[in-house]
Image: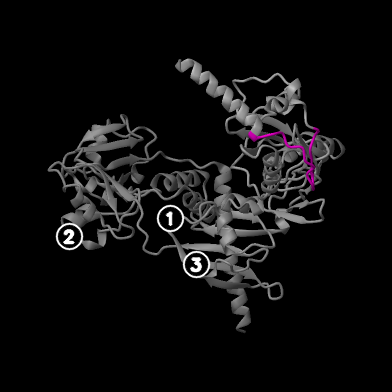
């Protein structure tokens, strides 16, 4: 009985639907033109899908044979959701029309080449050139007039593609979509330049270097409406503002000029992430330039920014002192140099390494220009009983750039040094400079035993403190029979250690024997110096200078004497 009642209820609802919602055949004004109504009696209705809209079968049957090629395309990559007010609808855009209620159906639709969507049982709706928001409203209103009892949606499912013109190092048309930005095709322009134009250019100019510099900040888009849009890719990626990297449209002409950095640049340096020279744009201000440098460093002083501007008349720099918060919109001119200063009292991650005969060797933090050698030893727990201060060292590693520059200057000064005459002297000097470069002159014994604060140096980042033990050896080398270590014996002179090393060799220059201190690496006359543990005893070789070196030496001496005599005679004659 219940089953029979349910069947009767279904039949009643179907009859009620037909009576309550008859087919509407009306002529719509504006851009909507309805199709003639189909005869319901000639349609095979599916009672499982049929609910309220009586002509649903007509609608579905009319779209079943349509071919939507873009429906098979892969998902289109986008960087964010489409802005309905900025997206402009055009031919070949793919949409999805949704009708929801008792009947739930999603229908694919494409904008035809005339700029319209044709909706079965509803008609043709013109959408070309409309914003996505307006196009959606127009289509939904047209469908609702036909299917007023259902919820209707009209959403973009796949953007169209079209051609734009590119004028740069290449001249061609490229396929893009309304969701393509200028930045996405710059790489195509650049690599095409390398692959095609460069080859042709090199064939015709084999002796000329071809180095294309495409502008990234002064790109222009010429719209078919006559509007000119400026594109600044650096500014876009630092602000993420679509204004500086807009989407492309049909009819666009994209002009990518050849950038000559030497004639159109600004400079930003100091406490920024990536200082350097960048292409200039006429709209640049202080905030833009800081963005070019990828923003401030963590220890930047934002209230201490200097802008150096050269005066074309006097060729002198005019300096502007700026604060970022107050002067972020300060106009920057071409060739300006922006320098961001560092904080004066910034806290950095500075440390020193303490090794050897201390109670707690390791890496210890220091403060900039403030921590002393004595304080560092205290942090390491003080010395072990085995510590031997005369052999302890402080090694300082300067940065690589400074070391190279300083070494070069030292070598250049050799030319002005009249004491370095022989080639062997020059080689020895070079070795001495390189081997002693990183040693600090510190007397640990005077500091920690005699409490001489003149030896309590200020430590620098990456200093290495090595507290040695007493090796109780003396190293003997040079012109001796057996080079090597000899056990130290207090009170003995250098002759004792040379004898232990087997005595002098035949080529030894006995009169020039030297004692070299372990810590300072200073050379001392063996006859006037006490040998200490850790010292080196060096016996040089008798050097017989080649004839050409002797001639050079004699010529230098004679030349100097001639100059002195000539000067004397000139002075004497001038006083008569």
Q: CA distance from mark 1 to mark 3?
A: 16 Å
Provide the residue designation for mark 2. 451
Residues rendered magenta in the picture: 20-36
Is residue 342 or residue 561 the one in the foreground?
Answer: 342
In the rendered structure, find residue 298 and report the number of the disc placed on it.
1
Question: Judging from the image, what secondary structure is the residue with disc 2 in?
Answer: loop
In the rendered image, the quadrant that contains the C terminus is bottom right
Specify few, some or many for label 2: CA neighbours under 10 Å numbering under 14, 14-19, or 20 or more: few
Q: Residue at x 56, y 43 (%)?
A: 547
Question: Judging from the image, what secondary structure is the residue with disc 1 in?
Answer: loop
Q: Earlier in the sequence, mark 3 or mark 2?
A: 3
- Which colour style is shown? one colour
Is residue 49 or residue 503 the one in the foreground?
Answer: 49
Placement of 47 over or under 311, stated as above or below: above
In the rendered structure, find residue 172 and report the number of the disc placed on it.
none
Q: CA distance from mark 3 to mark 2?
A: 51 Å
Specify few, some or many for label 3: CA neighbours under 10 Å numbering under 14, 14-19, or 20 or more: few
x then y, percent, for residue 138: 71, 45
Q: Earlier in the sequence, mark 1 or mark 3?
A: 1
Provide the residue designation for mark 3. 325
In the rendered image, the quadrant that contains the N terminus is top left
Placement of 16 over or under 406, stated as above or below: above
Q: CA distance from mark 1 to mark 2?
A: 40 Å
Q: Residue at x 78, y 31 (%)?
A: 37
Q: Is residue 291 visible?
A: yes
């Amino acid at each position: 009985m219940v089953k029979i009642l349910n069947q009767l209820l279904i039949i009643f609802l179907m009859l009620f639907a037909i009576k309550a919602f008859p087919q509407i055949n009306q002529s719509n004004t504006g851009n909507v033109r309805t199709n003639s109504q189909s005869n319901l009696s000639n349609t095979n209705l599916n009672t499982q899908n049929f609910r309220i809209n009586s002509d649903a079968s007509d609608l579905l049957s009319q779209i079943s044979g349509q071919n939507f090629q873009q429906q098979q395309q892969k998902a289109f990559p986008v960087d964010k959701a489409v802005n309905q007010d900025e997206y402009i609808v055009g031919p070949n855009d793919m949409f999805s029309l949704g009708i929801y209620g008792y009947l739930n159906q999603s229908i694919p639709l494409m904008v035809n080449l005339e700029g319209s969507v044709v909706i079965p049982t509803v008609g043709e709706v013109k959408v070309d050139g409309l914003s996505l928001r307006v196009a959606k409203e127009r289509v939904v209103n047209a469908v609702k007039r036909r299917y007023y009892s259902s919820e209707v949606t009209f959403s973009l499912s796949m953007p169209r593609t079209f051609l734009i013109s590119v004028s740069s190092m290449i001249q061609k048309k490229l396929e893009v979509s309304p969701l393509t930005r200028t930045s996405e095709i710059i790489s195509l322009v650049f690599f095409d330049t390398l692959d095609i134009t460069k080859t042709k250019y090199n064939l015709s100019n084999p002796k000329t270097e071809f180095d294309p510099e495409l502008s990234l900040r002064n790109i222009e888009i010429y719209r078919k409406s006559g509007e000119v849009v400026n594109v600044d890719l650096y500014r876009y990626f630092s602000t993420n503002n679509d204004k500086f990297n807009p989407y492309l449209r049909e009819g666009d002409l994209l002009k990518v000029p050849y950038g000559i950095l030497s004639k159109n640049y600004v400079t930003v340096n100091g406490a920024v992430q990536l200082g350097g020279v960048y292409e200039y744009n006429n709209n640049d201000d202080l905030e833009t330039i800081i963005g070019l440098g990828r923003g401030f460093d963590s220890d930047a002083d934002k209230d201490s920014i200097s802008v150096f501007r050269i005066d074309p008349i006097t060729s002198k720099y005019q300096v502007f002192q700026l604060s970022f918060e107050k002067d972020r919109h300060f106009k920057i001119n071409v060739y300006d140099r922006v320098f961001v200063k560092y904080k004066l009292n910034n806290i950095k991650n500075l440390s020193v390494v303490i090794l050897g005969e201390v109670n707690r060797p390791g890496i210890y933090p220091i403060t900039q220009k403030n921590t002393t050698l004595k304080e560092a030893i205290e942090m390491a727990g003080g010395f072990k009983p085995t510590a031997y201060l005369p052999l302890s060292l402080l090694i300082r590693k300067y940065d690589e750039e400074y070391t190279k520059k300083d070494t070069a200057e030292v070598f250049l000064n050799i030319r002005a040094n009249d004491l370095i005459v022989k080639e062997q002297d020059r080689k020895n000097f070079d070795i001495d400079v390189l081997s002693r470069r990183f040693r600090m002159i510190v007397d640990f014994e005077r500091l920690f035993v005699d409490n001489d604060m003149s030896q309590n140096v200020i430590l620098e980042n990456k200093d290495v403190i090595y507290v040695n033990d007493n090796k109780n050896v003396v190293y003997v080398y040079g012109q001796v029979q057996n080079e090597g270590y000899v056990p130290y014996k207090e009170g003995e002179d250098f002759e004792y250690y040379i004898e232990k090393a087997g005595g002098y060799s035949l080529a030894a220059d006995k009169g020039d024997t030297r004692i070299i201190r372990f810590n300072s690496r200073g050379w001392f006359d063996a006859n006037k110096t006490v040998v200490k543990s850790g010292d080196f005893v060096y016996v040089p070789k008798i050097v017989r200078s080649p004839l050409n070196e002797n001639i050079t030496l004699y010529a230098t001496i004679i030349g100097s004497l001639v100059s002195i005599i000539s000067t004397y005679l000139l002075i004497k004659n001038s006083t008569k």
